[in-house]
Amino acid sequence: MEDHIQTKDEFIVIDGYFSGNGIKSVKDVVEKRFENRLKTDFYNDFINWSKAENEILLGTFRASAAWPLLTDLGCIFDFRNPEKFVYQEFKLVHSLVNGWIPAESTSIGNNHVIAVRFERQIPKMLHELYEENEYHPKAPRGCLQLGICRKKDFSIILENIRKNRLKSDY
C-alpha cells in the first residue's frame, strides 16, 4: 500500500519540446550561466550531447518525481484526458534543474528541461506538443500537456487523477 501512496503522484507534466534551434538556445544559456562555475560531468555530457533521431528535449512544469538519469519510464499520457496514453520504453538521459543546471536527476518542486531516449522512434503525440524554438518557453495557455511516468506506475496515477477530478467536480 505504501508503494501506491508514493507513486500516485510520480509523474512530470510537459507542454513543449525543443526544436533544433531550441536545443541550441538551451545549450547557449547553459554555457553562458556556467562561464565562471565549476563544470560537472553532467554539464559536459549535456553540452556535448547531439540529439539522436530517437531523442527529444522537453520542457516541464514543477516535477512531482525525483528520477535519476537512466530511469526506465515507458508511459506518456494526455494530462487533461489521461485515458489517452501510449506505452513505449524510454529513459531519462539529461535533466536541467530550473532549465539550466545539469544534474544527476529530476528534483521535486522544480521546473526542468529534460532529454529522453526512446528504444524506437519518438511517439507522435510528443510532436503534438508546442514546439519551442528558443530557451524561454512560449507555450500558450491551454496548449496540449502530456504527462510522463514509469509504465508500472501509470494505473495508480490514472486512478489518482480520476479521483482528484471527481472531487473537484463537487
Image: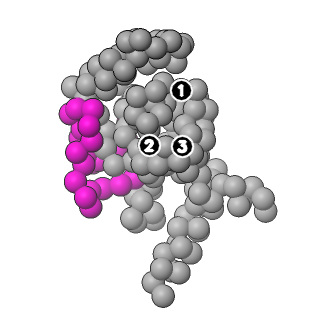
At numbered mark 3, what does the secondary structure look like: helix, strand or loop? strand
- Is 8 situated left or right of 134 in this image? right
Pointer 3 residue: 74
The residue under label 1 is which amino acid type? Ala
Give neighbour class at mark 3: few <14, some 14-19, many 20+ (Cα, 10 Å). Answer: many
**In the rendered image, the vertical position of residue 156 relative to residue 18, given as above or below:** below
Residue at x 47%, y 49% (from the top left corner): 62
Pointer 1 residue: 103
Residue at x 52%, y 32% (from the top left corner): 92
- How many numbered badges does the structure rendering display? 3
Q: Earlier in the sequence, mark 3 or mark 2?
A: 3
Q: Earlier in the sequence, mark 2 or mark 1?
A: 1
Residue 114: image quadrant is: top left
At numbered mark 1, what does the secondary structure look like: helix, strand or loop? strand
Pointer 2 residue: 111
The picture places residue 56, in percent across and down from the top left corner, at 37, 32
Q: Nearer the viewer, residue 14 or 28?
A: 28
At numbered mark 2, what does the secondary structure look like: helix, strand or loop? loop
Residue 77 at least partly seen:
yes
Residue ranking furthest to the front: 36
Residue at x 55%, y 64% (from the top left corner): 158
Residue 73: image quadrant is: top right
The residue under label 3 is which amino acid type? Gly
CA gap between label 2 and label 1 equals 13 Å
